[in-house]
Image (cartoon, rainbow, N blue to C red):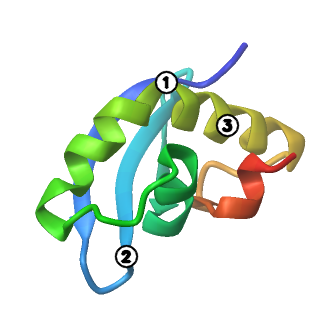
């Protein structure tokens, strides 16, 4: 069963990622996606820091599907965050 949608935590300027959560039954899985990965998905490089959460929301379905797939492919543990990078979407 794929991971379920959690909540959007926000943009971390220092790490250049948008943080979000997914749920594996009742366990919260911490996740993040790099801004480079989101830019590649959208084919643009002009997104400002204060627009990153909006960008995530536009791409949310694709991002969450890939986070779920990565979690199960790597047999990730719920205590380890999932970090999506641009190369995770070229598979």
Nearer to us in this view, 6 or 10: 10
Q: Mark 2 points at which residue?
A: 16
Up-down: is 78 above or below 11?
A: above
Left or right of 77? Residue 79 is: left
Assign the N terminus to one quadrant of the image. Answer: top right
1 or 3: tag closer to the N-terminus? 1
Q: Name the residue under label 1.
A: 61
Up-down: is 85 above or below 23?
A: below
Q: Name the residue under label 3.
A: 66
Where is residue 83, by image quadrant?
A: bottom right
2 or 1: tag closer to the N-terminus? 2
Q: Residue at x 48, y 45 (%)?
A: 42
Give the CA separation, mark 2 to mark 1: 20 Å
Q: Is mark 1 on a helix, strand or loop?
A: helix
Give the CA separation, mark 3 to mark 2: 19 Å
Please give the count of numbered marks on the rendered protein.
Answer: 3
Nearer to us in this view, 70 or 29: 70
Nearer to us in this view, 40 or 5: 40
Q: Which residue is drawn at 24% across and 78% down?
A: 13
Tag 2: Cα neighbours inside 10 Å, few (<14), some, or many (≥20)? Answer: some
Tag 3: Cα neighbours inside 10 Å, few (<14), some, or many (≥20)? Answer: some
Q: Residue at x 47, y 58 (%)?
A: 39
Q: Residue at x 23, y 49 (%)?
A: 53
Up-down: is 73 above or below 31?
A: above
Q: Where is residue 12 in the image (x, y as percent from the top left)?
A: 27, 72
Left or right of 42? Residue 10 is: left
């Amino acid at each position: 069963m794929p991971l379920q949608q959690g909540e959007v935590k926000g943009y971390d300027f220092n790490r250049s990622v948008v943080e979000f959560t997914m749920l594996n039954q009742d366990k919260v899985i911490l996740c993040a996606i790099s801004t480079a990965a989101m830019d590649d998905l959208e084919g643009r490089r002009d997104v400002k820091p204060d627009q990153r959460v909006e960008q995530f929301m536009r791409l949310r379905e694709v991002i969450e599907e890939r986070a779920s797939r990565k979690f199960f492919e790597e047999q990730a543990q719920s205590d380890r965050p999932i970090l999506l990078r641009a190369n995770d979407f070229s598979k």
